[in-house]
Image (cartoon, grey):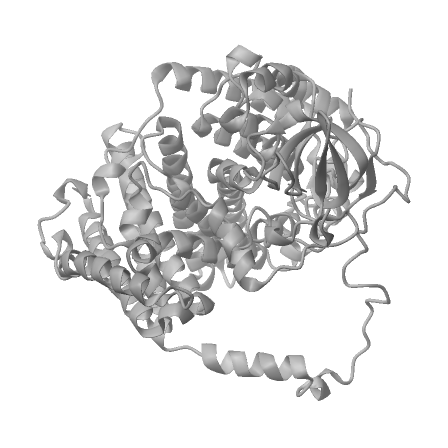
Amino acid sequence: MSASTTPSSRPAVTEREAREVAEAAREQHWRKPSFAKELFLGRFRLDLIHPHPVPEDEAAERGEEFLAKLRDFVETKVDPALIEREARIPDEVIAGLKELGAFGMKIGTKYGGLGLTQVYYNKALALAGSASPAIGVLLSAHQSIGVPQPLKLFGTEEQRERFLPRCARTDISAFLLTEPDVGSDPARLATTAVPDGDDYVLDGVKLWTTNGVVADLLVVMARVPRSEGHRGGITAFVVETNSPGVTVENRNAFMGLRGIENGVTRFHQVRVPAANRVGEEGKGLKIALTTLNTGRLSLPASCVAAGKWCLKIAREWSAAREQWGKPVAHHEAVGSKISFIAATTFALEAVTDLASQMADEDRNDIRIEGALAKLYASEMAWTMADELVQIRGGRGFETAESLRARGERGVPAEQLLRDLRINRIFEGSTEIMHLLIAREAVDAHLSVAGDLIDPEKSLGDKAKAGANAGAFYAKWLPKLVAGPGQLPTSYAEFKHGVDLSGHLRYVERTSRKLARSTFYAMSRWQGRMESKQGFLGRIVDIGAELFAMSAACVRAEMLRSQGDHGREAYQLADVFCRQARIRIEELFTRLWTNTDDLDRKVVKGVLSGTYAWLEQGIVDPSGDGPWIADATPGPARKENVHRPIR
């Protein structure tokens, strides 16, 4: 066995090797159309999202029936303050959710689940999460990325029949990828799965295992060493948590989401049957990323719920609280915040429902849409919660328990801020999402011109790539000059009292401008483009705003055509689009006018100690200890805190 695959050593990986691992895990082809992919290429394919897709009647009826049961349960059986105070969801609440079928929402009826669509699954998560975000995370981690989703997409029928009925009613599952020294760089994954007869032997440590403390079943990503008969690579396994050698060594505590069961899990000589391997060896990372394509949509659902609650509290409080002779809502400084919360909540629901319905219909490739929804919702929800705290003033900073103790309504605004903060980090941090989406957005360019900017390609390969690129750009670039966005009559069907057609024309024009900017940057920086993370992040943020504008307009028109608050929806969409356009123009300015180069120089100075004098005059309360805990494989050194719930 080579040194790179022994349990006691971590793989040494170069930057290029890390990129190659990530690239190999990508879905390489686009077999279905993608609205967002076309948007980044300067092609506004409104026909892919309008008319807005809607659930089938039977699916909607089944979904609404479950939502009614779930609402009754969370209103009568869940005490959010208790969960926050004790940092734990009571066992009887989890048992009640199991009985209700909430753990099987996304599992097909064939396997004992409810078989809800993605749309209604998200609505259920939003409802449950509004009662307690910890409950939303419990249900989401179990179904969105835990055992059910990977088995649904990649498992064998035998595996589905063995595990899905358990997940639907009795067993809780978790997804284990992250390690103490491995976050968004899976090429350095150290947990190993060594073939031994009909089994694999797992060794390693996993960190931040949401649901891991109470889970019965785990999806574990581990590295299989290459050997005779084994292609090796990162591979997915279903592991029984009660297997000998599995130890939950710690239940982690966080600034928010205090009720989640997140821990550190150690594997020492854990034998896993080969029948529990999901997919082929070496396909684990692709399984993980594909699972996240739709799994990420659960996070925007929680953000929609947060926005709705922020709006409710802002409305009620700002009408009741008076300053200088009138309700604070009538002061422009506060009113602008309320307008932002209302318009953004409408847009987030539009983005989430549209992407979810597209996932249900399976007519489109939504890998970019799902990623954009996660990125945009997590950032905007955090801003809305921050604005709510500001609107509430000192009461926004005060805990709900303290408010209640002195006789006021216990509004947990500060808790929401704490709970939402993690959304910008987990399931792909904002920075990683920028890079992931940017890679997909420039895929068409790299497909035809990638060899031109690859220093390791031969002159022959570069010549061939040059010919292909010339043919592609000769057809593509002229189409970026003019389009429907320049015709005053375009998208006239979106003009009903309030005129949204101008916003869609803006989206069409701006998508072409975005594509031209991307092309110019690739021409300018070529192989150095991947290091321009500030630029790429702004490109993605512009695309996210354009996607949200499109979704908001399409949703407003759908609601109008259905006679469901259509006039108000048009007003909210209009305000959101106007706010988004201001943000977009600022982002375009910052594409070329920024401090990126200066920032890099300052960073070098900080790391070299040039500015260490600036740190004088403080004490550091952090204490001693390593930055990253020791994760050397071996037997457990701590008590097992695994707590199965039955």
Relative to 72, does residue 37 appear above or below in the rendering? below
Count of marks, rendered view:
0
Q: Nearer the viewer, residue 97 or 306?
A: 97
* Residue 381 in view, yes or no: no
Relative to 263, does residue 446 appear above or below in the rendering? below
Name the quadrant of the C terminus. Answer: top right
**Residue 242 appears left or right of 15:** right
Relative to 253, does residue 333 appear above or below in the rendering? below
Relative to 516, does residue 210 appear above or below in the rendering? above
Instruction: Give the residue at x 29% y 43%.
Output: 35
**Residue 494 appears left or right of 33:** left
Place of residue 20 in the rendered image (x, y in percent of width and height, measured from the top left): 50, 54
Q: Residue 353 is drawn in which quadrant?
A: top left
Q: Nearer the viewer, residue 413 or 286?
A: 286
Instruction: Give the residue at x 78% y 84%.
Output: 617
Q: Residue 612 is drawn in which quadrant?
A: bottom right
Q: Nearer the viewer, residue 521 or 556?
A: 521
Instruction: Give the residue at x 38% y 64%.
Output: 457
Place of residue 187 in the rendered image (x, y in percent of width and height, measured from the top left): 60, 52
Place of residue 338 in the rendered image (x, y in percent of width and height, measured from the top left): 45, 53
* Residue 169 in view, yes or no: yes
